[in-house]
Amino acid sequence: MGMRPGWVGGLVEETFFVACSAHESRKKNEKNIFCLACRTSICPHCAPAHRHHPLIQVRRYVYNDVVRLDDLERLIDCSFVQPYTINSAKVIFLKPRPQSRPFKGSGNVCLTCDRILQEPFHFCCLSCKACMHAGGSCHDAGRRPVQHPLHVR
Ligand SMILES: [Zn+2]
Ligand SMILES: [Zn+2]
Ligand SMILES: [Zn+2]
């Protein structure tokens, strides 16, 4: 299964864990599900309307959006993206995390944002991989994660 930039781009650009505008008055209306068919984030109250669509659960880990590797692997090729083990589950970060200081020196770093990685991984998150597959535009932009074009809408 190859990379399908369409919905992957949507997944990494989408904002999760904000209130669903369609269900403002409901409890637990945080958007924590991504619908691959509609390429949009939805809340648990929206989910029944999308039950025939492929859905992926997004989780929160220290202010970062993550998805379970198991969930993602069924849908796309996650090779070279470094998984992290959180609560005994392997997860993948959707977006690059801010770095306290730029990494200087040799070592294995993310090809897009220079975050230090374990061997043999090349990307710290799905966004960095999607960026590379989209033509490497943010890589060519000088490897400055601050100017990452996958901004939050
Ligand atoms: Zn849908
Ligand atoms: Zn909703
Ligand atoms: Zn990265």
Image (cartoon, grey):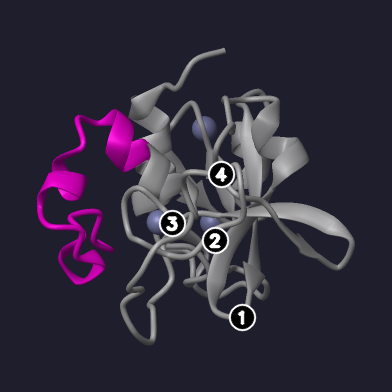
Secondary element at tag 2: loop
Secondary element at tag 1: loop
Contact? badges 4 and 2 (CB < 8 Å): no
In this figure, which residue is indicated by the disc labeled 4?
121
Q: CA distance from mark 2 to mark 3?
A: 32 Å
Q: Amino acid at mark 3?
A: Val
Q: CA distance from mark 4 to mark 2?
A: 30 Å
The image shows a total of numbered marks equal to 4
- Check if residue 149 falls in the magenta segment: yes
Residue occupying image coordinates x 32% and y 59%: 113
Q: Amino acid at mark 4?
A: Phe
Residue 94 located left or right of residue 136: right
Residue 133 x, y percent position in the rendering: 31, 29
Q: Around disc 2, counting alpha carbons within 10 Å, would you say few (fewer than 14), some (14 to 19), or many (20 or more)?
A: many
Question: Which residue is more in the foreground, 79 or 38?
Answer: 79
Question: Which residue is more in the foreground, 108 or 61?
Answer: 108
Q: Amino acid at mark 2?
A: Lys
Q: CA distance from mark 3 to mark 4?
A: 8 Å
Residue 56 x, y percent position in the rendering: 64, 41
In this figure, which residue is indicated by the disc labeled 1?
62
Residue occupying image coordinates x 10% and y 52%: 141
Q: Which mark is residue 109?
A: 3
Residue 132 located left or right of residue 56: left
Residue furthest toward the front? 106
Q: Which mark is residue 31?
A: 2
Q: Amino acid at mark 1?
A: Val
Secondary element at tag 4: loop
Instruction: Indicate the quadrant where residue 146 lies.
Output: bottom left
